[in-house]
Image (tube, rainbow, N blue to C red):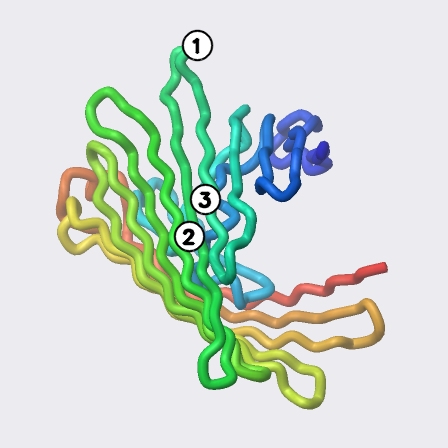
Amino acid sequence: MVDFDTDAGDGAALGVDENSLTIAGGFGKIVLGQDDDAADSYIIDEMDLIAEEPSATLASASIGTSSSITSDDETKIAYHLPAMGGLTAGISHTDRTAAGGTDTTSYGAQYSMSAGGASITLGYASIQDEAAAQDVDAENMGLKVVSGDISLIVSQGSYEKADEDRENQGASISYKMPNGMTVGAFTFKGEDNLDAGEEYTANGAEVQYNVASGLKATISVVDYDYKVGTGHESGNTTNDSGTMTQLTIGASF
């Protein structure tokens, strides 16, 4: 699998975004090359039910804005177990020693089941980067429930390193209406326990509507508030709050 990055972004050169070899069979799936950490396949966070995700840009703010955790596309080896009932799981390892960096170990799992006519999925994911002072640990846990046209997610995440101890909680809901519209809403709160009083909250809603075959419009509104903490990093940030409205038109062929 080769994924070419055609968006130069902030002046970055165009090139290969992901490049990997996958071997799959009854034994599971092995992925070799530049691809996501294994944990990326098992993350459940509040934004999974939101089609468009406008988020505040907090300059210098050291706090989470989602309960999700991030992975990278460095060269690695990953192994995913074959599905066993409702259980799926995987693990990956990135060896950066030769380049003088830090190794990364990532793993995750999901378990799906049915109860009372609803589909329930539990997910857990973890990424650990080795570091000289203190390892960098990120975790995500989530629960997704789908019952008919209604979907619900509750999730939480954490991020720890030498000067960070973040806790994140989020929830979202989505409803597919009989007229073809889909409405969704989410709420999120992030805190840094090492910076007393530092807090980020966001609440948003969106409406998706199929204008025509292959053409979809999404209107989203997000209200956010960021408060500076009084800890060791409070001098690097400023209070911020606001409301953002976004209209997105998507076409598929």
- The percent position of residue 21, horizontal first and vertical second, equals 67, 29
| Label 1 sits on residue | 98
| Label 2 sits on residue | 68
At mark 1, the secondary structure is helix
At mark 2, the secondary structure is loop
At mark 3, the secondary structure is helix
| Label 3 sits on residue | 39
**Image side of residue 200 versus residue 117, left or right:** left
Q: Quadrant of the C terminus?
A: bottom right
The image quarter in which residue 160 lies: top left
Of all residues shown, which one is farthest toward the bottom? 178
Residue for point 50% across, 80% down: 118
Q: Amino acid at mark 3?
A: Ala
- The percent position of residue 194, horizontal first and vertical second, equals 15, 45
**Image side of residue 229 versus residue 106, left or right:** left
Residue for point 36% across, 57% down: 141
Establish if 101 lies above or below 163. Answer: above
**Mark 3 in CB contact with mark 2 (< 8 angstroms):** no
Between 240 and 199, the one nearer to me in the picture:
199
The image quarter in which residue 212 lies: bottom right
Nearer-N-terminus badge (3/2): 3
**Image side of residue 110 versus residue 177, left or right:** left
Q: Quadrant of the N terminus?
A: top right
**Dot 2 alpha-carbon crowd within 10 angstroms: few under 14, some 14 to 19, many 20 or more:** many
